[in-house]
Amino acid sequence: MGEQEKAKITFFAAECMEFLDYGELYEDLSLPEAVEAYQRICKKGFPYGPGIGFNLKDPEAPKYSDINWPLYQGGRIALEEIRLIPAYQSHPLVRAAVQEMEGYLSNMSKNGKQNRGMERQKTAGKEK
């Protein structure tokens, strides 16, 4: 029959990572395209917790395929969220995405207000 399906990862940029349908959402992007879309969203001044996420399609991990999951939010790579799903934590495409995202971090943190959204503005200066 047909060729066996291979694993594929795509990325998205969202104005609001908690409620993806709220505001702007750009899907089916490469990681460089998602970073660019994220930066455009942030330049518009949206304080709703923008971020970048991924969507993994892998027939070897059907329970966790085709789900939008965070990669970068709150001014950091979303390692805690990725570790919640062992299939993501150990997947080579997700691991490669994390590594590639690390290369963008210096460009992502130049505008401090864009990084954290509303939830961190209230707690600034209270962290120990």
Image (tube, grey):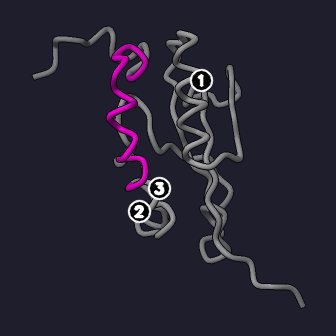
Residue 68 in the image: state x and y as whole percent.
62, 46
Dot 3 crowding, Cα within 10 Å, few <14, some 14–19, many 20+: some
Q: Earlier in the sequence, mark 1 or mark 2?
A: 1
Which quadrant of the view contains residue 77?
A: top left
Q: Quadrant of the N terminus?
A: bottom right
Residue 49 in the image: state x and y as whole percent.
49, 22
- The region drawn magenta spans 99-115
Task: Determine the residue positioned at 66% across, 69% down.
Answer: 62
What whole-number distance in Å separates the C-alpha atoms at marks 3 and 2? 11 Å
Disc marking residue 15? 1
What whole-number distance in Å separates the C-alpha atoms at marks 1 and 2? 25 Å
Which quadrant of the view contains residue 22?
A: top right
Query: What amino acid type is highlighted by mark number 2?
Result: Gln
Query: What amino acid type is highlighted by mark number 3?
Result: Ala
Majority secondary structure in the magenta region = helix
113 is within the stretch colored magenta: yes
Task: Determine the residue positioned at 68% across, 30% down.
Answer: 25
Residue 127 in the image: state x and y as whole percent.
15, 20
Q: Which residue is mark 2?
A: 89
Q: Earlier in the sequence, mark 3 or mark 2?
A: 2
Residues tagged 3 and 2 counted as in contact (Cβ below 8 A): no
Q: In the image, 71: left or right of 30? A: left
Task: Determine the residue positioned at 35% across, 48% down.
Answer: 79
Residues tagged 1 and 2 counted as in contact (Cβ below 8 A): no
Q: Which residue is mark 3?
A: 97
